[in-house]
Image (spheres, rainbow, N blue to C red):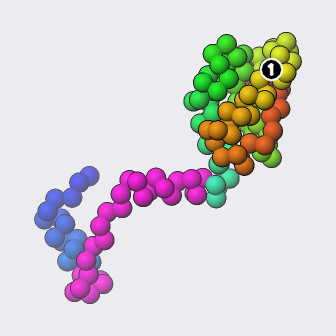
């Protein structure tokens, strides 16, 4: 609910009574400043790996190619090792042999090199 000018004057009068006649309201914090706080909060809550997995999911087809993306997805991050979920055993072997080196290079180009240090392939638990 948006305040009207009359409500703002009343609010300001209450604040001046509380904090003194020289009270001036602080300027509203910009969205950009608030957005800058989010990564630190996520890290403090232990959610930075979920943020990375979400970002990877959005970029996955571009990172691994359309055909590969149809058979694998980013799963989870364990001790800086990205676990990749694969749909079939044959694809698991093929992706491990062909994709690992190029995917690691692409991850390091796009994201912080310290976020992902290794790759591991597993069968997709949701299948």
Check the image and report above or below for 33 versus 24. Answer: above
Q: Residue at x 27, y 73 (%)?
A: 25
Q: Does the magenta run of residues contain 81?
A: no
Q: Does the magenta run of residues contain 31?
A: yes
In the image, residue 85 lies at what x, y percent? 76, 25
- Image-quadrant location for residue 75: top right
- Image-quadrant location for residue 60: top right
Q: Nearer the viewer, residue 96 or 50?
A: 96
- Image-quadrant location for residue 117: top right
Q: Residue furthest left?
A: 6
The magenta segment: 16-42
Judge from the rendering whether residue 8 lies leftward or rightward of residue 71; answer left or right.
Answer: left
Q: Residue at x 30, y 84 (%)?
A: 19
Q: What residue is pinned by disc 1? A: 98
Q: Nearer the viewer, residue 16 or 71?
A: 71
Q: Residues within 10 Å of mark 1 (few under 14, many from 20)?
A: few
Q: Nearer the viewer, residue 127 or 84?
A: 84
Q: Residue at x 85, y 12 (%)?
A: 90
Judge from the rendering whether residue 118 lies leftward or rightward of residue 70; answer left or right.
Answer: right
In the image, residue 36 lies at what x, y percent? 48, 56
Judge from the rendering whether residue 71 lies leftward or rightward of residue 28; answer left or right.
Answer: right
Check the image and report above or below for 61 versus 80. Answer: above
């Amino acid at each position: 609910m948006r305040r009207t000018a009359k409500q703002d004057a009343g609010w300001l009068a209450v604040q001046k009574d509380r904090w003194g006649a020289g009270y001036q309201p602080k300027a509203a914090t910009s969205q950009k400043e608030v957005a800058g706080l989010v990564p630190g909060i996520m890290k403090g809550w232990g959610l930075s790996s979920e943020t990375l997995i979400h970002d990877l999911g959005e970029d996955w087809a571009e990172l691994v190619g359309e055909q590969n993306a149809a058979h694998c997805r980013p799963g989870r991050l364990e001790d800086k090792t990205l676990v990749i979920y694969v749909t079939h055993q044959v694809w698991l072997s093929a992706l491990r042999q062909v994709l690992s080196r190029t995917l690691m290079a692409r991850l390091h180009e796009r994201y912080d090199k310290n976020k992902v240090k290794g790759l591991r392939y597993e069968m997709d638990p949701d299948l």
